[in-house]
Image (cartoon, rainbow, N blue to C red):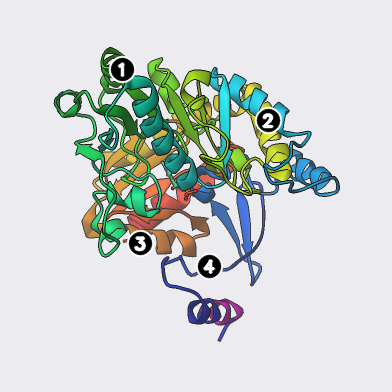
Amino acid sequence: MSTTETAIASAEAHSAHNYHPLPVVVASAEGAWMTDVEGRRYLDMLAGYSALNFGHGNRRLIDAAKAQLDRVTLTSRAFYHDRFAEFCTELAALCGMETVLPMNTGAEAVETAVKTARKWGYRVKGVPDGMAKIIVASDNFHGRTTTIVSFSTDPEARADFGPYTPGFEIVPYGDLTAMREAMTENTVAVLIEPIQGEAGVLVPPAGYLPGVRELTRERNVLFIADEIQSGLGRTGKTFALDHEGVVPDMYVLGKALGGGVVPVSAVVSSADVLGVFRPGEHGSTFGGNPLACAVALEVVAMLRTGEYQQRAAELGDHLHRELGLLTGGGAVEAVRGRGLWAGVDIAPALGTGREISEKLMEEGVLVKDTHGSTIRIAPPLVISKEDLDWGLDRLRTVLSAR
Ligand SMILES: Cc1ncc(COP(=O)(O)O)c(C=O)c1O
């Protein structure tokens, strides 16, 4: 057996099979490139589902982490630490908000948003106890906890994990009329992804997001934007909602906030909304720890220059132009997305998304499939134009060779 085969067999023997990874075993990575245990190099066109927006081993982020490792890494929230205030202040400023509640993973931040909205509903809006409802969209992906899968429409994510948490109404994504009809006086929030990542990088129809903003404002309902995957530069702006000039009541952030170094997530909102919490009502041992704050502070500083957003916009235009050319030839049925983020529907006759991903891997490019014949392309924002073109060439090769 090769080193790769041995490593995979061992991993499969000793880990739960809750993932079906591509058969590559990464040993090191830098920028947009990963190297496997046998020394083969791959262009990373997935970037940890946007967790690696700033690339692998980003010097600024690694230096920030190393400096913090030598000072203090964890205090728990039982004490203050000297990176906490700066992190909260800077992240709130980036979001144009006032208050930050830090957690670790995306799912925890979504759970936090759900708890915040319910508590706000009871304490501020005056919804009768136990009656709060949150409207979500079909084909959503917000994480894997029992409450979050309760409002998933994906049988794979949901089946066998009941009983499910009540209090959620599911309406078709992009359908404002359905959302309006689902709203009652007990609706406390709308929770949506401004672009649905897992569903295949679905961009909603023009006017939908401003419509959600208007409707939620009119009905005294919180607009919660899950920008865990779409936010922090990926689409060519700081937030995907910026493209529509929409400001939500609450951002839910994760992935790139930790710079690909440590898990960092957060809910960012107004002092009024996050002000509903009292000591003891919510928290996390690791949420807002010094190491996380040090890295995330650097992430925020990098985003405040606007440089990464601009890069994603420029390279994204190029990516979409090139992918658009493929749609004429029959191999690609549709391309969606914004910035350096694309969902590419491959003609089913050419293979499943998984098969195309495996072929691309053989060509030295790593992407990931989602649902059927769709592949997702989301390289680190630091990718060079030459490398992006090289990856696109490999995609053309794979599509024409089949
Ligand atoms: C939009 C969105 N929300 C939430 C999550 C969950 O994040 P995590 O895997 O860090 O729990 C994800 C992860 O893919 C996501 O894309």
- Looking at marks 2 and 4 on the same chain, the residue that comes earlier in the sequence is marked by 4
Disc 3 is placed on an element classified as: helix
Instruction: Nearest to the eye among marks 1 and 3: give it.
Output: 1
**Residue visible at 18% across and 23% down?**
180
Nearest to N terminus: mark 3 or mark 2: 2
Check whether the beta carbons of the residues at disc 4 and disc 1 lie within 8 A of each other: no
Magenta range: 3-8
Amino acid type assigned to the residue bearing label 3 in the image: Arg
Within 10 Å of disc 2 (Cα), the crowding (few <14, some 14-19, many 20+) is many
The quarter of the displayed image where residue 257 is located? top right
Q: Mark 4 — residue?
A: 24
Q: Residues within 10 Å of mark 4 (few under 14, many from 20)?
A: many
Instruction: Tell me the SS state at disc 2.
Output: helix
- Mark 3 → mark 2, Cα distance in angstroms: 39 Å
Most extreme residue toward the front, as rendered? 129
Q: In front of the other: label 2 or label 4?
A: 2
Q: Which residue is mark 2?
A: 87
Disc number at residue 220?
Answer: 1
Residue 267 visible from this viewpoint: yes
Q: Identify residue type, mark 4.
A: Val
**In the rendered structure, are the residues bearing label 1 and label 3 in contact, judged by CB atoms less than 8 Å apart?**
no
Number of residue marks: 4
Q: Amino acid at mark 2?
A: Phe
Determine contact: label 1, label 2, CB under 8 Å.
no
Place of residue 305 in the rendered image (x, y in percent of width and height, measured from the top left): 66, 22
Task: Give the mark nearest the N terminus, 4 or 1.
Answer: 4
Marks 2 and 4, how far apart in space?
Answer: 36 Å
Residue kind at label 1, given as amino acid type? Asn
N-terminal-most mark, 1 or 2: 2
